[in-house]
Each structure stands twice: as C-alpha cells, then as structure tokens.
Image: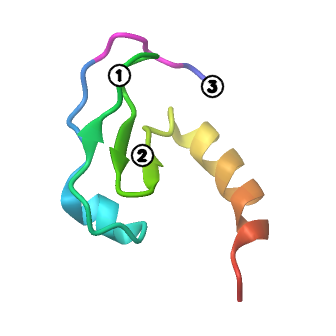
Amino acid sequence: MKINYGVKIAPPTIEIARAFGSKEEPIPLKGGQNTSYIAGNIVLKPAGGKSGTEWRAQGFCCFIRK
C-alpha cells in the first residue's frame, strides 16, 4: 500500500461522518500525518488506496453485527 505523506486532500464532510453514525462535524486531529479527523466518538482517516481499503474491509466485516 502506497501512502503519499504530505498530500493535501479534502476533509471529510458531515455526510461522511453521518454515514459512520456520528452527528458531529469532523474536526482535524493534531499530530501524525495530519490526515485524521474526529467527529463525535469516531475517528476518520483516509484509507490509503484501493488495495488497503479492500484489505481492511475484509477484516472489518467480521465485526459487523447481523
């Protein structure tokens, strides 16, 4: 997985936060790679590309309650 450090991307929108169950506006978290945002009790961070996203999706599917 390739991570482009220092690349500026658009911050997550309130709609993205709502999709993950938050009602709060995302605000930047300090430190690290400056790509993480907090919205209520969730942290939003870019996935880092298609292969990384697919890998995480396979792992996280085990945690979803049906």
Residue lying at 42% horizontally and 45% vertically, measured from the top left: 44
From the viewer's perspective, is the residue at label 3 or at label 1 nearer? Answer: 1
Q: Position of residue 14 (x, y in %)?
A: 21, 59
Mark 3 neighbour class, 10 Å CA radius: few under 14, some 14 to 19, many 20 or more: few
Q: Secondary structure at mark 3?
A: loop
- The mark that comes first in sequence, 2 or 1, is 1
Picture mark count? 3
Residue at the bottom extreme, as displayed: 66
Rounded to the nearest angstrom, the CA distance separating label 2 from label 1 is: 13 Å
Could you say which disc has been placed on residue 1 in the image?
Answer: 3
The main secondary structure of the magenta stretch is: loop
SS state under label 1: loop
Residue highlighted by disc 1: 30
Give the amino acid type for the residue marked by disc 1 in the picture.
Answer: Lys
The image shows residue 54 at horizontal and vertical percentages of 64, 50
Q: Position of residue 16 (x, y in %)?
A: 30, 60
**What is the CA distance from the residue labelled 3 to the residue labelled 2?**
18 Å
Element on which disc 2 rests = strand
Q: Which mark is residue 44?
A: 2
Q: Earlier in the sequence, mark 3 or mark 2?
A: 3
Q: Amino acid at mark 2?
A: Leu
- 9 or 50: which is nearer to us? 9
Question: For this view, does 64 lie left or right of residue 18?
Answer: right
Q: Which residues are magenta?
A: 3-7
